[in-house]
Amino acid sequence: MAAAAAATLGIRSVPSNIWLHKFGARTAAASIRSRSFTTLASLSPVEDTEDIQLNVIPKEDARESVSSTSNNNNYKSNKSYYPKRGQTLELVCESLAFKGKGVCKVADSGFVLMCDRALPGERFIGRVTRKKDNYAEVKKLKTITPHSDYVEAPCEYASHCGGCKTQSLSYEAQLKAKEQQVRDLVVHVGKFSDQEPEFGGVMKPIVPCDIQFHYRNKESEELDILLTANASFGLAVMMEFSFGPKGWVPAEQLQEKSTDECVYALGLHAPGFFDKVLNVNKCLLQSDSANEKSGNESRATWRRTVIVEDYGVQDGRRKHHNVLEKENENMHEFHGYISFKVVLATVQECWRDPELGLSPWNVHSHTGFLKHLMLRSGRNIETGLPELMVNFVTSSDNPECLRPLVEKIATIPEVVSIVNNVNTSIGNTSVGEKEYTLYGKSTITEILRGLTFQISANSFFQTNTRQADVLYKLIEDCAFLKADGSEIVLDLFCGTGTIGLTLAKRVKHVYGFEVVAQAVSDARQNATLNFINNATFIEGDLNKIDSTFASNLPKPDIVITGLEMRSPMAFSSMLCEWHPADPNRPGMHIKLIKFLLRLRASRIIYVSCNPATCARDLNYLCYGVPEQNIDGRYRLSSLQPVDMFPHTPHIECVCSLELR
């Protein structure tokens, strides 16, 4: 291909953190002018890319652009000289933005381009797929030079699955990128300065996840992330598969696949597509046992033992739990040995039989019967053995159609519950209006921080239970609870009550608020199950509070707030794409911000799975909202990022604020 000169575009400089502007960042003009921009993109040709036509802006247009820019700084007048949709560029990824997209910039202009699955230092060919006012989105076509922290992705679906995006980035580099994202958002969205000496004591190093694979707890491809957990200590595991009328095959594999492999699908969604299902036989983020081991082997090779854990229960005695321990091996190697693969294979074997009439749901024609297959596991508290729940989500109320599948699946030893959720809406969500228990019991159980929790098919339970134990310990440490147990805790967005209940043993009373009725019911049941009588859970919409909110409750000493992944509200706000744009999730309503500032609790612990809105809310609580004449009353004393889900963009933050 003939060499082409790199074009110089006469476009105003745009800061590299342009994606922060969606969250209301107010970067000073002087800061923008002084910011240096590295040339990260060019329009020059690349060797061995004859099949890709690079688009080059003519030099005459470029000179005209420069002249026009010097005479008129109006962005609109030069808009035509920004990269256009369909244009192909050679790019270098500079960093990772929130949600895991690579940040690139056009040569000599600094215009930002966001590319999914592009990693820092990677040079690649990309095509502009979407053009917006202040940035563009790019699809990666071909990698020229891999990034410096490249590792071989062990998953064969890593390039095509809609879940984990950074498998080929070393885990150390993932942690560094996530920590930097939190730091940048706090500095640029909030008014916190990383130049101040005390900031180093406030911003803590990210807490890693000690197991990076086979830790999966939940997967929901509509959410475009892997909500995962390790199955160690009998931790809950969940997988969600989708049915489709035709299996999606990547373009580069079309010649390798037979026609039969494209008919009917049961698997995971392709990245960015709600209507394309990729057939998947295994996932490296689910429990190792879910991929390889059988239920009979799990029962034969594991013995039950008693491990003593001291969680400081209210009566002062140690609490004992039955857990599983493998003969002569480390406890952390236990993965539950749940036969997810056996269940999946059983369903695959039967559901395509035309005599059964089990057609897959078609999201375009709104026809078909089977929508989702959801597999969830916990452990039996009495025996310590793993137990599995199978949930079929269907489009109509006809549970008898599932009888042949139920009879086969019920023979698998670990399966203790088979349910049917009926979702008659044209949407593709997995929560139904009705639920039938087709076999066994309607719930399974799990242990977290020394407490027993009941899990139903639609329960909102922490998805990486092993790392949740770490997260909740951090929250407890941030609370600085008194030894006399005299404090009142207000737990906002409490979900099924997990955080409040884990603190209840050390405080006088916990009051939890949650908008979802089923979650409130689950929280009350979990309190009863654990003989906790100093926790009250109340249904209420925290976005619609007034001056009388919580007026009949004692003033809390500690408030726990933020949309962490324990609350159905956090999930419901994710279901519009999975990541709704501008902003990703709403954070706290301004009414709730005002309430907290009036309340003046001694300490606020803000737990959030969205660093962007977290930074904004921290800014409001500490510095106020000048345009509404609201003064801030708190000081940020610590900010602790936690990596809950390796290989995904997800970041959890635990923030501690003290009343000034």
Image (cartoon, rainbow, N blue to C red):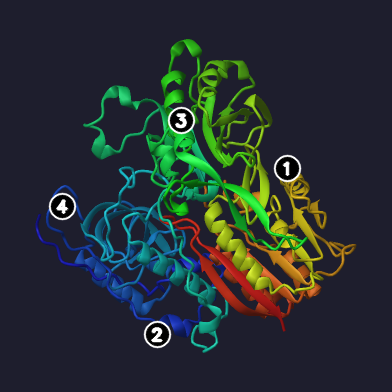
Tag 1: amino acid: Gln
Among numbered discs 1 and 2, the one appearing first in the sequence = 2
Q: Which residue is mark 2?
A: 34
Q: Secondary structure at mark 2?
A: helix
Camera-near label (3 vs 4) is 3
Q: Which residue is mark 1?
A: 518
Residue at 50%, 38% in the rendered image: 240
Q: Which residue is mark 4?
A: 49
Task: For label 3, count other residues whose C-alpha is less than 10 Å away and answer few (under 14), some (14-19) or many (20+).
Answer: some
As drawn, is 85 to the left or to the right of 363? left
Task: For label 1, count other residues whose C-alpha is less than 10 Å away and answer few (under 14), some (14-19) or many (20+).
Answer: some
Q: Secondary structure at mark 1?
A: helix
Among numbered discs 3 and 1, the one appearing first in the sequence = 3
Tag 4: amino acid: Thr
Q: CA distance from mark 4 to mark 1?
A: 55 Å
Q: Which mark is residue 296?
A: 3
Circle 4/circle 1 CB separation < 8 Å: no
Q: Which mark is residue 419?
A: none
As drawn, is 9 to the left or to the right of 377? left
Q: Secondary structure at mark 4?
A: loop
